[in-house]
Amino acid sequence: MTSTMIVLIVGIVVVLMAVYVSWRAGRLDRLHIRLELAQESLDAALMRRRAVVLELAGSRLLDPATSLVLAAAAHEARMAGPEEREHAESDLSGALRAAVDQERFREKLSEAAGGPDLLEELDAAVAKVVYSRRFYNNAVGVTRTAQRRWLARTLRLAGHTEYPQFFEIDDNPPATMATE
């Protein structure tokens, strides 16, 4: 009778542990999916910002020097490899701030044909980059925490995936940008 109870208790404990490990593995998998979606969203937001900046630079609404600086920064951000990407995107943010924070930039652009639409697109693209990067970095932090837990490390629940890296860029919007 006692040996049957011991086997039953051990069996229940093993089943509960298996359920818990399975739940942790599923959670880690869902975190990795969330991280991939956040990465795709960030990539799309950065691509959209580059596209709007290139459209603004080619619109003939800006002076040639500003257009050239913006186009060069957007091109560099587009062509940057994985190692230079954060730096190139930060440079684009800086070039954008320098252009948009010029005296009466928004007023001049608002008065030109098509200017208000470009300003609206630019505001939305810059805000989307800020939010997407925050969401991505939050997903990275949560995933790294889950991967560092002793159960995940011991049982290799994350497989051979590396710790995800934060995406740190200077994404401060221009001072004159309409942010909420």
Image (spheres, rainbow, N blue to C red):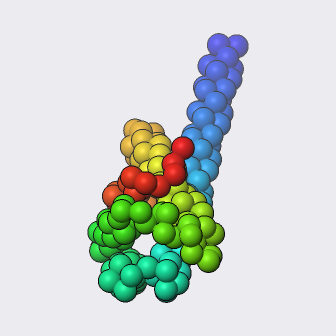
Residue 148 visible: yes
Q: Which quadrant would the C terminus be assigned to in this image?
A: top right
Q: Nearer the viewer, residue 70 or 14?
A: 70
- 108 left or right of 90 in image: right
Q: Residue furthest top?
A: 2
Tell me where residue 90 sits by quadrant.
bottom left
Q: How many marks?
A: 0
Query: What residue lies at 58% left-to-right and 60% top-to-bottom?
Result: 124
Query: Please, is residue 142 above or below residue 131 in the view?
Result: above
Query: What residue lies at 47% left-to-right and 55% top-to-bottom?
Result: 177
Query: Please, is residue 86 above or below residue 17 in the view?
Result: below
- 28 left or right of 144 in image: right
Query: What residue lies at 44% left-to-right and 79% top-to-bottom?
Result: 62
Query: Please, is residue 105 above or below residue 178 in the view?
Result: below
Percent from the top left, x then y, of residue 76?
Answer: 35, 82
Percent from the top left, x then y, of residue 128?
Answer: 55, 58
Q: Which quadrant would the N terminus be assigned to in this image?
A: top right
Q: Nearer the viewer, residue 119 or 51?
A: 119
Tell me where residue 32 sits by quadrant.
bottom right
Query: What residue lies at 37% left-to-right and 86% top-to-bottom?
Result: 64
Percent from the top left, x then y, of residue 166?
Answer: 38, 55
Residue 89 visible: no
